[in-house]
Amino acid sequence: MTVDPLGLMSEVDRATERLLRNVADLPELEAPSRLPGWSRGALLARIIDNAEAYAAVLTAVAQGREPPRVTDLPATPARPATALPTGPRTDQHADLLARLRASAAHFAEAVATMPLTAWRVDVVCRRALRRPAAALLWERLRVVELHHVDLDVGYSPADWSDGFSHRLLHDLVTECGKRDAPPLVLSPLGAGHPLMIGKLMIGTAADGVPTVRGPVRHLAGWLSGRGDGDGLTVVPEGPLPSPPISM
């Protein structure tokens, strides 16, 4: 899917501002997030690390240097690359919030200094995929929007835009296709065509494959593991399958 770096950066900026507003009074950094094994503080540190990692890649590309591999900059719940602040709770929160703003500004600065032709330079992205540098804008937007939901601060897939939800859904369907997921048809309401996950066995009738229907935000939320399937229906009637991938 084609990426317009400047147009997509405005979406990244808006998503980042929504995140900053919602975590301005975030209680208990040590409290668990919705992402198994991750505290809210560790997840915020992960978002910071992601911005800094992508900024480092774009800066190297803009300067004509060999960019670092994004996969060379890992973080884990127990040991994020960005150390969590210590001290009184108010100081911890202020410090983490300041670093979140600074990392977002650093990423935006790296984007602004990219020559137009540099966006076509290949870099190693998530899952060790080699893609044009322009893809990092979409990858950053994914990180901010998905982890915003994971923080469990009242933000949900219902708050995603239609454009983001459609693109995320197509991304997830593509990823499912690389993992030998069982056959499944997704039918977003209002979309021009359904999306097929998995491959039919030779001689298998397509009408025997479950179809999951519903609003695109609900489908994207469910398939990404960020929704419980509320608002979705299954044809033929039956229980909602488990999402074929987890993120």
Image (spheres, rainbow, N blue to C red):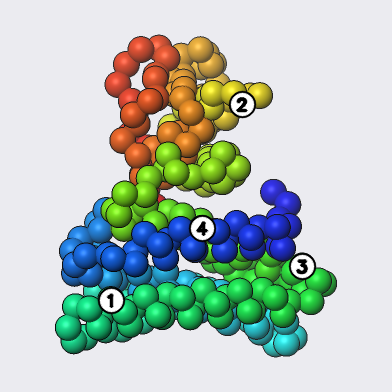
Left or right of 197? Residue 242 is left
For residue 190, what is the image quadrant? Answer: top right
Q: CA distance from mark 1 to mark 2?
A: 42 Å
Q: CA distance from mark 2 to mark 4?
A: 24 Å
**Earlier sequence position, callout 3 versus callout 1:** 1
Left or right of 194? Residue 237 is left
Image position, residue 3 (x, y; %)? 71, 56
Q: Residue at x 75, y 86 (%)?
A: 64
User: Which mark is drawn over residue 34?
Assistant: none
Camera-nearest label, 2 or 4? 4
What amino acid is at disc 1?
His
What amino acid is at disc 4?
Ala
The residue singled out by tag 4 in the image is 15
Image position, residue 72 (x, y; %)? 48, 78
Q: Are marks 2 and 3 in contact (CB under 8 Å)?
A: no
The residue singled out by tag 3 in the image is 120
- Badge 1 element: helix
Q: Residue at x 40, y 62 (%)?
A: 21
Pointer 2 local density, CA inside 10 Å: few below 14, some 14–19, many at least 20? few
State the residue in front, 222 or 207: 222
Q: Reply above or below: 206 against 34.
A: above
**Earlier sequence position, callout 1 versus callout 2:** 1
